[in-house]
Image (spheres, rainbow, N blue to C red):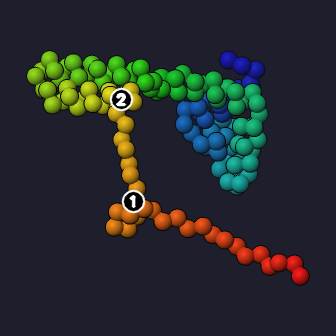
Amino acid sequence: MSDLTPKQEAFAQAVASGMSQSDAYRAAYKIRQDTKPDSVNQAASRVMANVKVASRVEELRKPVVEAAQITLASHLARLRALSEAAEGSAQYSAAITAEIARGKASGLYVEKTELTGANGGPVETVTRVELVPLAK
């Protein structure tokens, strides 16, 4: 843990768990029910602006963010496993689809898109010209 007060730590934990800053402030600081929402929002914003609190929230979120990351390598490995499993079950269509998806993710397939204008002609471009009066 860091050098936060117990209330700041509770606030950081609540924000990192997905609560809004205002709800986290209400929970951590146990404020009165009749406190105006604007007052709560401002107070929560001030707490979150504290560098130590913001750093703690980031620290608490980091493992979750890292676990959710997908890399190209992991994506390709997963597609390969799916392709091999489908081929092993004689589901060749599914295996081919997985292999095509692997190829696309690897950049082996390039889709060409051609834009044309009316009746297949060239795209017309319009240039806006502003007239500036000449000095006399």
Q: Is mark 1 on a helix, strand or loop?
A: loop
Q: Sequence order check: which comes first, mark 2 or mark 1?
A: 2
For residue 74, side relative to residue 81 (left or right): right
Taking depth in this image into account, of 22 and 124 the one nearest to the observer is 124
Q: In which quarter of the image is residue 95?
A: top left
Q: Where is residue 53 in the image (x, y as percent from the top left)?
A: 71, 30
- Residue at 74%, 48% (x, y): give it: 42
Foreground disc of the pair 2, 1: 1
Q: Which mark is residue 125?
A: none
**Above or below, 48 relative to 60:** below
Instruction: Report how far apart the C-alphas of labels 2 and 1 lie in the structure.
Output: 26 Å
Mark 2 touches mark 1? (CB < 8 Å): no
Taking depth in this image into account, of 80 and 66 the one nearest to the observer is 80
- In the displayed orientation, state which residue is furthest to the right: 136
In the rendered structure, which amino acid carries the disc numbered 1?
Thr
Q: Where is residue 125 in the image (x, y as percent from the top left)?
A: 52, 64
Q: In which quarter of the image is residue 129?
A: bottom right
Instruction: Say which quadrant the C terminus sits in.
Output: bottom right
Q: Where is residue 132 in the image (x, y as percent from the top left)?
A: 77, 75
Taking depth in this image into account, of 63 and 126 the one nearest to the observer is 126
- In the displayed orientation, state which residue is furthest to the left: 90
Q: In which quarter of the image is residue 37?
A: bottom right
Mark 1 Cα shell of 10 Å, populated few (<14), some (14-19), many (≥20)? few
Residue located beneath label 1 in the image? 116
Taking depth in this image into account, of 80 and 13 the one nearest to the observer is 80
In the rendered structure, which amino acid carries the disc numbered 2?
Leu
Residue 10 can be seen, yes or no: no
- Residue at 39%, 59% (x, y): give it: 116
- Residue at 20%, 28% (x, y): give it: 96
Instruction: Say which quadrant the N terminus sits in.
Output: top right
The mark total stands at: 2
Residue located beneath label 2 in the image? 108
